[in-house]
Amino acid sequence: MKKRWAFVLLSAMLIVLSACGNNANNKANEGTSNTGNNANQSEKLEKITLFQSKVEIAEALENLVVKYKEETGNEVEVWGSAGDSYITQLQTKLAANEGPTIFSVQPGAEAEKFASYYHDMTNEPYAEYISPNMALEIDGKVVGMPIGVEGFGLVYNKELYDPSKVTDTNSLVQQLEQFKADGINGLSLSQEAYFLIGHIINTPFALQEDPVAFIEQVNKGEVKLSEVPAFQEFAQVMDAIRANSVNPMEVTYDTQMGDLATGKTAAVHQGNWSYGMLADYDEMEIGMAPLPILGNDKLAVDIPAGWVINNKASEAQIKAANAFIDWLYTSETGKNTVVNDFGFIPAVTTIEPTGLDPLSQQVFDATQSGNTISWALNYFPQGIIINDLAPLTSEFFLNTSMTPEQYLEKLGEVWAKAAK
Amino acid sequence: MGKARNGVISTLIVIGALLFLSPIYIMLVNSFKTRSELYENVLALPGSFSFEYYAGAMKKMNFLTVLGNSLYVTIATVIFVVILSSMTAWMLVRRDNAMSKIIFFSFVATMLIPFQTLMMPLMQVMDWIRTNLHLPMLNTHEGLIFMNIGFHAGIAVFLYHGFIKSIPIALEEAAVLDGASTFGVFWRIVFPLLTSITVTVAILDVIASWNDYLLPSLVLSDKGLRTIQLSTFYFFGEFTIVWNQAMAGLTLTIIPVVIFYAFAQKYIIKGIAAGAVK
Amino acid sequence: MNRNSKLWYMLFTMPLFLIFLTVVVIPFLIGIYYSFIDWDGIPSNPKLFVGLDNYATLFQDQRFLDSAWQTIKFTVFALISVNLLGLIFSLIVTAGFRTSNLARTLLFMPNLIGGLILGYIWRFIFTDGFKQIGETTGIDSIFFNWLIDPNYALLALVIVFTWQMAGYTMVIYIAGIQGISEEVMEAAKVDGANLWHRITKIVFPLLMPSFTICLFLTLSGAFKIYDVNLSLTNGGPIHTTELFAMNIFNEIFGYGNYGLGQAKAIVFFVIVALVTLTQVVITKRKEVQM
């Protein structure tokens, strides 16, 4: 008698989990068959999922899909992840056939990595809305819609810094020395990999005639960076920052922007996204200027990421995903959300930017006039900024005996090693 | 020991413990500050104690839903872990044969594997189970609970194993002579003796389930399924953190476990006292 | 009867073991298989069988070897400080003072905070906090930004890990101490043994099972540390605090060398398993049989 009870209890316990699971499974099946029926009667589309890396727009996106359902009756489930765990989660979910229908990837190495998953968008109607040269393309095919445009350069306090006087490396170095004499932190970087080196090193690469081909050469160790003029001047700038500004290793993104907002720092190397960091401080006049290596007078502007559709999703889901993207860029609700709630500089012709913040306005103006350099950093070998460039650069800032020449030399070394 | 002396030392202990906890002060004060206040001085008290960031964090996190989800996952995990691992550990101790040794060894050894190296194959196995056995392991709470049990089994069996060895076998033998079944011996005689280690296992397991981020982030995708930890992602951007809401959100996530722990540790003492009376 | 007994054995052990097998063991075996292939971790991309190449590569990877050495250093320091502090805490809160319960809750609280955020909180202390203390007291040889000095950054990790884990081991030590019968202690008191003798001659030997458990848990926790590592130092400055789990993580998800990352994990697992199991065997032998 007792034994029987034991069996009952044990098997009950074991079954509980699977039973719960089975129920959920059945429900899910019913769900899909229902939508199947509905599709015949009305235009109800399959439910899709969307996964993206910008935490800043997560809430706005969730609100948007609520409105999308109200307006069209179709459902989009928005997934979320903390900023730095996005790629890991995406990769693992794809491995488990749990991939999202729509997801975002950065152009370049990251986009190449997931290339086997992209639905070809070339012939989708919305591909025509993309502003010139702003599509995410692989092998000549449009595979991603740009989520927006971003730009970076020297973000400066207009009261302290005058870009018309700083037009080349020499004048920048002199200006930094002057700031030091005045007790002001001239040009501040911060310890986060991209803000320490990832963005600022973009300029010497982007200034090459063919940046992508040049990166190929650096990958193979065929170029001596210390003999390339743009890099010589870049190292000079880094040296001047080390000599005249606060050690970037002591600065976080938060303090960097705080120092700028409170007038302790004249300029920072940052992008238009950093405007959001200033919201809590007193208003100030700020602008964005190019990093004037080799007399460069252009901001670095490109698309930070593109929406792609997972070609492993079902036919019906791909159809629904196409419908959603089209709606995002053509409906009033969608367009309004992109500019005002996401705060993106649009990279499509269907959206007129309104109410941009001063930095974004400047970036937008630069795209209109074509006065931009590309984000060569998108074509760097995967992971190199965080794993190799940032550690080397922190060594440069911590070890004052390392000369700019040695820095460039080591840069070439770690680069070739990482690119293997 | 004199009453006065006891009082003085008691006070000193609390002061020492509070000092030990001082980093939590940073969490609390900064849950009330604006970004510029935090920039001015991380350690200073906030200008005003308004609970707006708590309200904001709760709204963003969809607090009641995610609290419910976390409670369900945690409670179910802990119940299963306690029942299954105490039974397993007891058998492994009392039948100390080669098989037991192998099983125990594999439970213990795998505790040394970093989760990061298991996560991709794990998800593939779960996908296989879903496709071939039609059990929805992914994107369900039950799937997460199942995986939690597997990952927490090692430590729980390890803790029970060590404890059970110190229990005299005589009582069990007497019960067997009285005609009790193996099942009866375990639940009537052995399990009650395990109370203090059970509470310890439960405490540690509650924390492990409650605080876990990585595994749930891989298993649960849908918004409605998020646990309390997953829902804090809104505050953690790639380069910056919305400090005030993040700290407020964090404080909110800790409160339930603090209450649980304060409650559970009283129970340990009760269990011990009851044992002593017998 | 014998058959029956086997059935009971299976009934008690198999449910958990089967779950454990699916969730941990099988993925681990698949991981071993992956360590012999060259793959970037994207399911639809090609997997190339390369035999032992990954293992050969990792022994030439200076950064991995450095990381392993740092991990060992970290673990040794952490092992000592966590257990010392945990033991002291447990002795204090079981000594029968009025505020013991309160203290127990307070001391355990750091463990309730997840590793990531804990690292962020401590980063404020080591950067802003220490700087402020250094500036006001003038002792800036100790109070400076620890996280940009390679040696101090590792120490900072030890401190944070200790802060988090001391309460955890305390709970286990408490369970052990409360398992020691009051009668034994009373008898010793009556016999005139002082506090020190009571602790070293009675408590410690009877605590051996707790030591086994705590040492093992600290060891495995320290070897596997990732969250705090990520949020406190992120491996910096200059890779000096890139501990083992982070090195593997970067290899797999940063560089996209899935096979190599798995090979590293296997090698380290074997080493760590040997070390810890030796430890368990040694301390187990010293446990007192009741």
Image (cartoon, coloured by chain):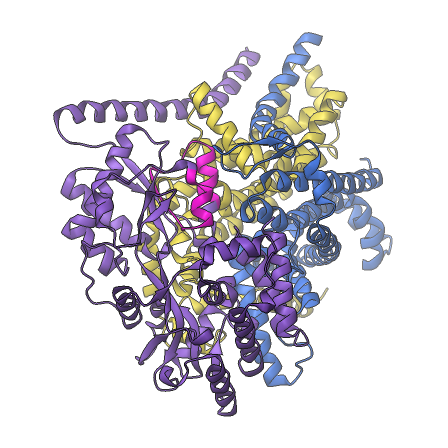
Chain colours: A purple, B yellow, C blue
Image quadrant assignment for residue A19: top left
B184 over A372 or under it: above or below: above
Residue visible at 16% across and 43% down in the picture:
A70
Whether the magenta-drawn stretch holds residue A101 is answered as yes
Instruction: Name the spot of residue A77 as percent of width and height, x first.
Output: 30, 40
Instruction: Name the spot of residue A325 as percent of width and height, x first.
Output: 24, 44
Residue visible at 66% across and 49% down in the picture:
C244
Instruction: Name the spot of residue A130 as percent of width and height, x first.
Output: 25, 51
Q: Quarter holding the C terminus of chain B?
A: top right
A89 over C237 or under it: above or below: above
**Which residue in the rendered view is the most extreme toward the front?**
A209
Judging depth in this view, the residue of A184 and A297 nearest the camera is A297
Across the whole image, how many numbered discs are drawn on residues? Answer: 0
Q: Quarter holding the N terminus of chain B?
A: bottom right
Is residue B191 shown to the viewer in this render? no
B129 over C280 or under it: above or below: above
A256 over A306 or under it: above or below: below
**Which residue in the rendered view is the most extreme toward the left?**
A41
Judging depth in this view, the residue of C37 and C179 nearest the camera is C37
Q: Which residues are magenta?
A: A88-115
- Specify whether A369 is left or right of B197: left
Is residue B243 shown to the viewer in this render? yes
Judging depth in this view, the residue of A331 and A65 nearest the camera is A331
- Specify whether A86 is left or right of C213: left
Whether the magenta-drawn stretch holds residue C138 is answered as no
Judging depth in this view, the residue of A4 and B275 nearest the camera is A4
- Specify whether C69 is left or right of A348: right
Residue visible at 32% across and 55% down in the picture:
A57
Instruction: Name the spot of residue A345 as percent of width and height, x first.
Output: 27, 61
